Image (tube, rainbow, N blue to C red):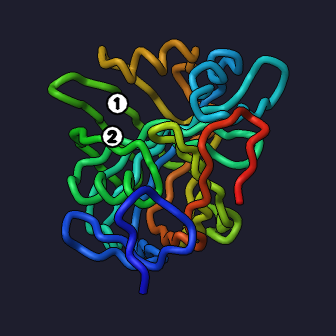
Amino acid sequence: MSESAGPASSGVSSHMVLGTRVNMPVHVRRARSAMALHSVDAGVAQRTIDYSGLTIRKTRPGRGLCALIFVRYDDGDLGPYNEFGVAFPVTSGVLIHRLPVDGEFTMAAGRKIWGFPKELADFDVSFGSRFRGTLSQNGIDVLRLDIAAGVRAPGRMFARPLDAYSCLDGVTRRTTWTMTPATVRTRPGGSRLELGDHPIADELRALGLSRHALLSTHMPSLRMTSVKQPRCHERGGRSSRYT
């Protein structure tokens, strides 16, 4: 069994994180998620993620998408914790642009193994027929997201591999995850977003996020697995390839 002492790399079967061995692949046996998908200015979004070398996927001329996602990990290899993601669909997958969490271990593991931009923050979340989530950091409100109940849909409609990209310390990585929800509730709109005074809120505000989402989705029971090791390259422009 090999052990990683440095940045994320392919072909590694385990990593030591804060004195604890994390075996690959990593499994999430039970989680809950709530997502609001917004239309954004594609030009502003592209400038926001230029550091990654990736290209925003346009839904129509001048417009792209941004997903705001709360996840509660109840049972997984990295322990229980809360997470909030700002993600942009790109031409080859999804870029995880921001990823606050409320656990030291998952922050260290996420940064070391996958190069995810995890940072510590505070959460107040409530999952149920409706979702309510508040994110703050250093005593400053970032945002509040409320999602109403949607129409029930079969989980298999949303079960698929996902190529998740990250960029940390000038290295862009791609990791393939599987997502297997048991049930899903979804609807057009269905959310309300309030932005605070934090720099992350300012960044979202600059994207021209609408007050209401194009689509909202609630997954009350979700399993995930990192099915492929991270593949990475030093940023060399948008034509760079992964090996």
Left or right, residue 77 beside residue 1: left
Q: Quadrant of residue 145?
A: top left
Distance from disc 2 to disc 1, alpha carbons, whole Å, reads 6 Å
Q: Residue at x 65, y 56 (%)?
A: 163
Residue in the picture at 66% in, 26% down: 39
Specify the farthest residue to the left: 139
Under mark 1, the amino acid is Arg
In the picture, the quarter occupied by the N terminus is: bottom left
Q: Position of residue 124 (x, y in %)?
A: 23, 42
Q: Nearer the viewer, residue 107 or 27?
A: 107
Q: Position of residue 75 (x, y in %)?
A: 32, 73
Q: Considering depth in this image, is 152 or 166 the residue closer to the camera? A: 166
Q: Which residue is mark 2?
A: 133
Residue at left offset 30%, top offset 52% = 107
Q: Secondary structure at mark 1?
A: strand
User: Would you say the residues marked 2 and 1 are in contact, meaning their CB atoms lie under 8 Å apart?
Assistant: yes
- Image point 25% across, 41% down: which residue? 120
Q: Earlier in the sequence, mark 2 or mark 1?
A: 2
* Image coordinates for residue 23, horizontal then vertical, percent: 39, 79
Provide the residue designation for mark 1. 144
Residue 187, can we see it? yes
Residue 37 seen: no
- The x, y position of residue 186, in whole percent, is 60, 50
Q: Is residue 198 left or right of residue 40?
A: left
Label 2 amino acid? Gly
Total labels: the figure holds 2
- In the picture as drawn, the residue positioned furthest to the right comes out as 61
Q: Callout 2 environment at 10 Å: few (<14), some (14 to 19), or many (20+)? A: many
Report whether 21 appears left or right of 92: left
Q: Residues within 10 Å of mark 1 (few under 14, many from 20)?
A: some
